[in-house]
Image: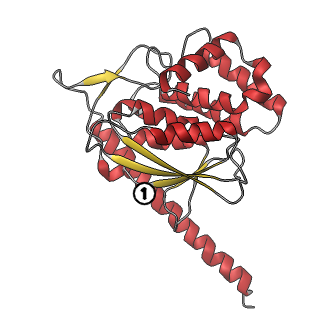
Amino acid sequence: MEDLPEIQALAVKQEKILKQLAELREQLVSMRTDLKVCNKPAQPSAQTAPAKTGAKSKPQTTKVEPINASYLQDFVVNASPENIPYGLLALKKLWIDRLNLQVECFTHSTIPKLNEEAVHFQNQITSFEPKLENLPRILVTLIWKNVGTYTEMITSPTAYVPICGEVNILRFLSRCGPSEFNYERNDDVAEVDSILDTCYQLINKQNVKDKKQVLKTLSSKLGKTPSFGGSDVSLCDIAATSAIKQVQKALAKDINPNVAKLIGRVSAVVGF
């Protein structure tokens, strides 16, 4: 018995998706291998910078290396104006002397009008550019679209294999951006990933009660320290601040004073 046309079409589509996923996996494996090769102990004369990772461990240093332009590719981010990806603005400002994260904004037909906060964010992220010339560049096309809490990044419009969640977009950018922001080069990777996973859950849990529990977990991970990353603004600090800002209307009464200080500190540094 021959398969129905619908089943045949579905099988072809599935095969195409599996092929795209395999190609994406090969790219990530290649990036990880290259990063491990580059992550050799720095010579005494090498330039180093504090590691902006996220865990509350002893200070570490990461070798400041030229950005590998072969990893840089333009991409699209679909985001809801109700869940603004503040992390993009933070990275643009923190990387201002290392990488030009150029952002262009558009509004999809599913959004009749941008809210005031989204307009403010859009004005901020498009209003300043690096003063240094000839910096490596990534062009980000930010499209305000009704995608709910699942902000998505698309690196290949033809393949359309999205990276879902702002936290995972930050993970991706940390690997291909300035080396001193790549948390995978340090010993606290598992702890940082745990914090980032908690930030992802905080945004995407649909039940307010569940969000409160996740916020409590995140607060306990921060403890009484001023930030996750020490004296520098880390990837965890950025992810946590962005996540909390996205849920603060519902959880304003549950944000403890130390978490509020973290948000204030990060907001002051990156200009939220």
- Between 215 and 264, the one lying in front of the other is 264
Kindly identify which residue carries mark 1.
26
Amino acid residing under circle 1? Glu
Q: Is residue 138 left or right of residue 119?
A: left
Residue at horizontal 67%, vertical 82%?
8
Asked where in the image residue 249 lies, by quadrant, the reply is top right
Q: Is residue 112 above or below residue 130?
A: below
Q: Is residue 118 above or below residue 259?
A: below
Q: Position of residue 119 (x, y in %)?
A: 62, 41
Q: Is residue 258 above or below residue 42?
A: above
Residue 84 visible here: no
Q: Position of residue 257 (x, y in %)?
A: 68, 10
Q: Is residue 65 left or right of residue 177?
A: left
Asked where in the image residue 123 lies, by quadrant, the reply is top right
Callout count: 1
Q: Is residue 62 left or right of residue 159?
A: left
- Between 39 and 94, the one lying in front of the other is 94
Residue at horizontal 52%, vertical 20%?
268
- Between 125 and 218, the one lying in front of the other is 125
Q: Is residue 1 above or below residue 264?
A: below
Are there few (<14), some (14-19), or many (20+) residues within 10 Å of tag 1? few
Q: What is the quadrant of the C terminus in the image?
A: top right
Residue at horizontal 50%, vertical 39%?
125
